Amino acid sequence: MTGLGAAHLAVTAVTGGIRWEHVLVDGLFMVLPWCGARAQDFARAFLPLWFTGILVEWQKFLPLLGQIRTGDFRALELTFFRVGNPPVSFAEWLYVRPILALDLVCGAAYALFIYEYFGVAVDFFFRNRPRFDAFVWAFFVANLAGAIIYMLLPVAPPWYIIDHGLGPADAHALGSAAGAARFDTYFAIHYFEGFYARNPNVFGAMPSLHVAYPLLVTLFTWSRGWRWRVPALAFTLLVSFAAVYLAHHYVLDVLAGYAVAVGSAWAGIHLGRRFGSRKPAVPPAAVPSP
């Protein structure tokens, strides 16, 4: 792990994109293996999340292997989900009908979705390590699946169609906070503006990983009963609505995000069993027979 951290830090420095968080995280992975068994256990457990971070960041180096879909994908969306006359997508219809309360609630959900995931991950780490292993590997698989689909099937998000029209896509277009920019304006901040300025793939709209993450939380906390199920499911639905309301995704993107989450949860369970971060404290051969 020390070598992995040093290698990533060196590559990031050479490519000119090094930031303080790279130094912090890579530094931890370089130092923790030398700080005792508990520190090694911690670093090993969070390795899938480190891999995920690199995967997300390095998407900017991945080529778009398919034609960027604009008008044809919007037409497919209108086949199943449309509103108004002439018909438009729900994202387009909602975009020109903003409501202050929805701007605030949807903006907050869109800002907090990743923190919900990491909060539950930390809880699993201390209370249920096998579940934690499956959870973080599912997160990695979801992001890997998203990156592959983005390369093979790049799709323009609704805000791009609103801003640039249905013609051939500009592969060098800059990211946009779209409807989330209203949230920034209300609080005089630049949270979403800065977040989407670093977006590694403007045309990574389908599937929506924004909805995949909270659905993973819902799936992995389902066994804890209704006190977890209700708020987790409600937050998943809220983020799903926000994805469309803020014009970042079509309904089809949201449904594809659900499919990715379900498939990734299944894969994460198997990968967690295979590459679990903690070995049994007592060798199986030493356990007395019942």
Image (spheres, helix red, strand yellow):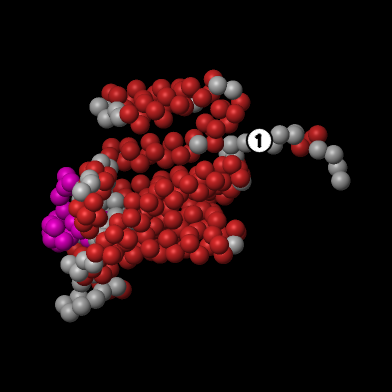
Give the residues in magenta: 155-174
On the rendered structure, is 249 left or right of 173? right
Residue 267, given in percent of the width and then of the height, sits at 52, 50
Residue annotated with mark 1: 279
Q: Total number of numbered labels?
A: 1
> For residue 81, which quarter of the picture?
bottom left
> For residue 15, which quarter of the picture?
top left
Q: Residue at x 58, y 48 (%)?
A: 131
On the rendered structure, is 1 left or right of 114? right
Q: Is residue 70 magenta?
A: no
Helix, strand or loop for disc 1 = loop
User: Foreground residue, 243 or 14?
Assistant: 243
Q: Amino acid at mark 1?
A: Lys
Residue 13, given in percent of the width and then of the height, sits at 30, 24
Q: Residue furthest bottom?
A: 85
Q: Is residue 158 magenta?
A: yes
Q: Residue at x 49, y 35 (%)?
A: 47
> Is there any visible trace of residue 114 in the rendered image?
yes
Q: Is residue 177 above or below residue 166?
A: above
Q: Residue furthest front?
A: 187
Q: Is residue 222 above or below residue 88?
A: above
